[in-house]
Image (cartoon, helix red, strand yellow):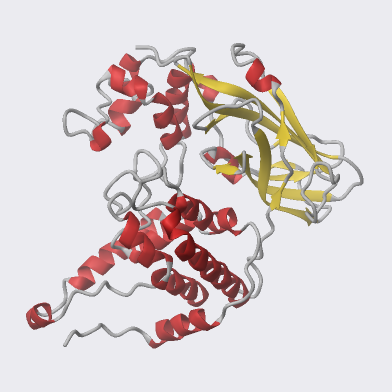
Amino acid sequence: MKRIKRMHVGKIVAIIAGALLLITAFQNCGQQLGEGFQMDQKALQELSQNAELNAGDKSADENEDEEEVPEEQSTGDLCEDQLYAKFGSGYYVFLKNNCASCHNGDHEAPGFASKNSLMSYQVFKDKGYQLISTNALSAAHNPPYTGTHHTGTISSLKTEWESAVNSWVDCKGGSVANNSVVTGYKTNAAILENKANAAYWGALSWNMSTAADMPTNAAKFPLSIKIEAQVAMVSGNQVGYAVRNPIMSLTTGTQKYRVKGLFFYVNDKLLDSATVYRNIDAVICAGTPVNLAPVGNAQLLVLSSIKATDKFALQFSSIEKVDATAKCGTTSTETVPVDNTPATVSFTQLVSNDPKLGVFKSQCLSCHTGAGARAGLDLTNYNAAKAKASVILTRINDAGSPMPTNGLMSSAMRAVVEKWVSTGAPK
C-alpha cells in the first residue's frame, strides 16, 4: 500500500480552510496578483534545496514500497498556504498535464508547471492567472495542448482561483485589497503614420477625473497623465511600440496622491515587459508635474502586428490619498542609464571581453554557444543574434521570465543591449 508523508497540523488546517473559504470573484485580479507576489529567488532556491535534502533522508525500505510523493512545502504564511493549496488542487494539475513539456523549469519558458510545486506557484502568480488562462485557450499558442477545447476547464479553474484569492484577502484582514486603477483606451493614428521618423513621439493623455477617459463605474481622481509613444523598429521591421515620459499632474485641489506601478495595455492585451515601470512609487502634489520614470528610459512593448487602430490603456497598481506631510515626487530608486551608453554598440563589442560592453560574453554565452546552444540560439553567430534582437531585448527586461534565467542583469547592461537593438543591431 502506498504511504503518504505526514503533514504538519497547521498545514492541514490551512488546506481545509482554503477549500471552505470561497467568496465572490473580484475584478482585475490577474496583474495585481502577480504584482502582489514578487518572487524571492534566493528563498525559493533554499526551499528547493531543502526539499531535495529531505527527500534524500528516506530509508531504503521506504524507497522500495512507497511511490515517490513530492515533499510538502509551505509558503511560511498560514493565509497564503490556503491559496497555495488551491493552486495545487486546481491550476497546477491542469498545467502539469498540458504545459510541462515547455514550462517545467528546464527551459527558458516560465516554469509554472515544474516538479517543484512551490516554485511553480510563485511563477504562476508572477505571470498572472489571466495571461496563463488566455494562452491555455489559444489555438495558436501550442496546439493540441492549448485550444478552445479547454474552455470549460479554464472557466471553472478561474472561478475557483478568484474565489480563493478573495478568501486569502479575507484571511489577511483585507490588508491586501485590490487598489488597481485602469484607464479607458486612447488611440493616436499619427504614431503609426510617422513610423519612418525616428524623432517623432506621439502623445497620449488621460484626464482621470472624467467619464470620457475612465471606464464606467471606475474610481475617478483629480489627476492627469501623459505618455509619449512611437513605433519601435528593429532592422527595418516593426516590433511594437516604445513608450517614455509618463508625466502625471494634479488637476485640482491640494490633496496629495501616491501612485504605484504602471503597466500598459494595447488592444486589451497586457504588455508587462516594461519592468522599470513596475517599481514606480511617486507622490503627486499640486503644481508639481512628476515624470514617474527616469528620463531616457523608453520601454519596448512587443506586439505581433501594428495597426492604425491600436488602442492604449494604462493600469496602476494603486492610487491612494496620502497625508499632507508626504514628500512630493518619485521615490523610485530604479534607473536605466541609457544616456550613459555609447552612441552605438556593435555585435563585436557585445561578444568581446570589454567589461562594460561585452554583455553577451559575460551574461549569455555560457548557455547560448555552438550547436548545443540553449533554445537553439547561438549568440556567437551574428545573423542568429540579429534575427532574434527584438526577442532578446524583451527577455532581458522581463522580470517574470528573464534572460539570464537567474534574474535580470543590471540596468547598465540592459541599456547596452537596448542601444545595439535600437540602432539596427550593427555587426
Residue 312 visible to the viewer: yes
Query: Is 169 on the left-hand or right-hand side of 147?
Result: right
Query: Is 273 on the left-hand or right-hand side of 225?
Result: left
**Coordinates of residue 31 in the picture (x, y in percent):** 57, 53
Q: Residue at x 25, y 20 (%)?
A: 381
Q: Nearer the viewer, residue 390 or 407?
A: 390
**Coordinates of residue 407 in the picture (x, y in percent):** 39, 44
Q: Nearer the viewer, residue 60 or 150?
A: 150
Q: Quadrant of the C terminus?
A: top left
Q: Residue at x 59, y 56 (%)?
A: 32
Query: Is 62 on the left-hand or right-hand side of 325?
Result: left
Q: Nearer the viewer, residue 94 or 368?
A: 94
**Coordinates of residue 265 in the picture (x, y in percent):** 62, 41
Q: Residue at x 36, y 26 (%)?
A: 388
Splitting the image into 4 quarters, where does residue 56 fall? bottom left
**Coordinates of residue 172 in the picture (x, y in percent):** 60, 74
Q: Quadrant of the N terminus?
A: bottom left
| Image position of 27 with respect to 225: above or below | below
Q: Residue furthest front?
A: 149
